Amino acid sequence: MPKDNIVYNEDCIAGMARLEPESVDLAFADPPFNIGFEYDVYDDDRRDEEYMDWCQKWITEVIRLLKPSGTFWLAIGDEYAAELKILMQRQLHLACRSWVIWYYTFGVNCTNKFSRSHAHLFHMVKNPEDFTFNVDQIRVPSARQLVYGDRRANPKGRLPDDTWILRPQDLPDGFQADDDTWYFPRVAGTFKERAGFHGCQMPEQLLGRIIRACSHEGETVLDPFAGSGTTLAVAKKLKRRYTGFELSDQYVVKIQERLEAIRSGDALNGAPEPTVSAPSTVDGTRLGKRKSRKPAISRQKKLPGIS
């Protein structure tokens, strides 16, 4: 069994190889995207063949550690999404339950192509006939509840769709109730939720949906690329055991500080349902105050793996 609630400061392939097989209930991985992002100890600019070979090795170890009913979520960018889906399904024999698109604004501003504003989230399982999916833990308000006031609406809400969008309150007609929509903000640099030591960070509410849906309290959650520690922090808050791996000794120190500052059962950071909790920004106003007319300038050139 993996040691409970620990972050290993080492390469995940070597570290996972020492753990007992079929000992993990849920794994979430947000690996480097191989787009040249500057990490302190990892080379994010490899040849395609080298990167795919590396991915196959660490994903194989994740699969070995998953219980027969275990679930694996992979976050990845456009560059290798198709190749990795084929690898996982055809060579490593996982079953794909959902191909989720996480949509956000304030993404990568491009000049000669459509601006990138999404990442891919693959929901994979070992056994398509036996896996955890806690429906009532992840329901969201339906259009019948929010828009139409329909008495026939299920008071528990509905299941989320498979596209998650940042600011639905600014697009009231852009995504209808039967569209593929998940609602979560990217953790921008000005957010209180931002840990501050890692270039990119996944929203706690997004990880909360995944962990609630695909595991139970007391079960083990694995993150091979702990990064800013969000997966582990959310696992602790939701009363799961956790095991993480991280190459950077500096990141490990910060992750441990983050974990020590929270308690099991603490509320997750961020809005659980932006369509309900986020204020309107129509006509440049927010909470009754006029925003500055000075145009915002994005300083971010690209988005690496967000963990």
Image: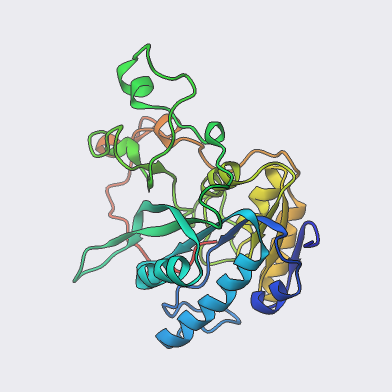
Q: Quadrant of residue 178?
A: top left
Between residues 284 and 132, which one lies in front from this camera angle?
A: 132
Between residues 23 and 210, which one lies in front from this camera angle?
A: 23
Residue 48 vertical position relative to residue 73 in the rendered view, above or below = below
Left or right placement of residue 198 versus residue 220 in this view: left
Q: Quadrant of residue 19?
A: bottom right
Q: Is residue 247 visible?
A: no
Left or right placement of residue 172 versus residue 213 in this view: left
Residue 149 vertical position relative to residue 38 in the rendered view, above or below = above
Residue 172, image x, y percentages = 27, 33
Q: Quadrant of residue 302?
A: bottom left
Between residues 115 and 61, which one lies in front from this camera angle?
A: 61
Check the image and name the residue furthest to the top: 151
Say which residue appears at 45% left-offset and 52% top-offset: 186
Q: Is residue 215 visible?
A: yes
Residue 16, image x, y percentages = 70, 72
> Looking at the figure, which quarter contains the C terminus?
bottom right
Residue 169, image x, y percentages = 33, 35
Check the image and name the residue furthest to the left: 112
Residue 139, image x, y percentages = 49, 32
Say which residue appears at 36% left-offset and 23% top-offset: 146
Say which residue appears at 73% left-offset and 59% top-offset: 23
